[in-house]
Amino acid sequence: MEVWAENTWFIRCLETGLWKATKTIDRRRTRNGFEKYVGKVKELKREEYVMGRLRWFESVRAKKLQDVVVDAWKAYIKRYKCARTFLLRSIKGVDRLIANDALTTWKAVYFQSRRNVYHENIAELQRRKRGHEQHIGELNRQIQINDSTLHHVESKLQSQS
């Protein structure tokens, strides 16, 4: 039997003491098991929280990395466009120089061909002039021959008459 005396509980028999002790042990085992369970739950919740934070951190880092990659890509595109503009301008300048050189060469060739035509025309005119002069010379000789023949015939006729 149990008796309360001045806030203390006295156990008077062995069976009650064993029952109370087993009850206390079971309660402590249950409490210890529950505390272990609560600790495990807290540990799992903490692990889930930490993993969530890690996933968030990784996503933020991935976002930062993605932003860095996008910025690098934009910088590459900007450099590419600038380089392409520079090359196109330089190519246009080179093309302009080539076109100007080609035009200068064409003008020089055209001038040379016109000069050659003029020189050929001058040579042809000089050849014709020499030919005409020779022909005139032959005609003058023929005229002289004819004149001398005519004088000869006239003198012969006068001498015969």
Image: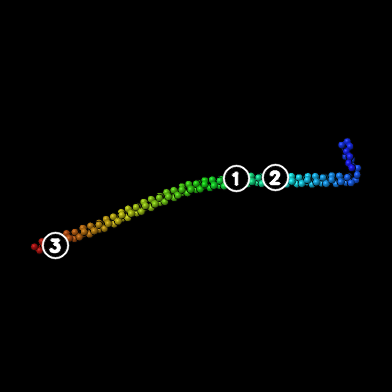
Judging from the image, what secondary structure is the residue with disc 1 in?
Answer: helix
Q: CA distance from mark 3 to mark 2?
A: 150 Å
Q: Quadrant of the N terminus?
A: top right
Q: Quadrant of the C terminus?
A: bottom left
Residue at 56%, 46% in the rendered image: 74
- Circle count: 3
The x and y percentages for residue 12 are: 91, 42
Determine crowd level at label 1: few under 14, some 14-19, many 20+ residues with C-alpha closer than 10 A.
Answer: few
Which residue bears the numbered disc 3?
A: 153
Residue at 88%, 38% in the rendered image: 4
Examine the rendering and report whether any part of residue 101 can be seen: no
The x and y percentages for residue 29 are: 82, 46
Q: Earlier in the sequence, mark 1 or mark 2?
A: 2
Examine the rendering and report whether any part of residue 85 can be seen: yes
Q: Mark 1, mark 2: which one is toward the viewer?
A: 2
Image-based side of 116 in relation to 160, left or right: right
**Quadrant in the rendering for residue 17:** top right
Q: Mark 3, mark 2: which one is toward the viewer?
A: 2
Q: CA distance from mark 1 to mark 2?
A: 26 Å
Q: Mark 3, mark 1: which one is toward the viewer?
A: 1
Determine crowd level at label 3: few under 14, some 14-19, many 20+ residues with C-alpha closer than 10 A.
Answer: few
Residue 101 vs residue 45, the one in the foreground: 45
Image-based side of 76 in relation to 101, left or right: right
**Amino acid type, label 3:** Val
**Farthest residue, direction left:** 161
Which residue bears the numbered disc 2?
A: 49
Which residue bears the numbered disc 1?
A: 67
Q: Earlier in the sequence, mark 3 or mark 2?
A: 2
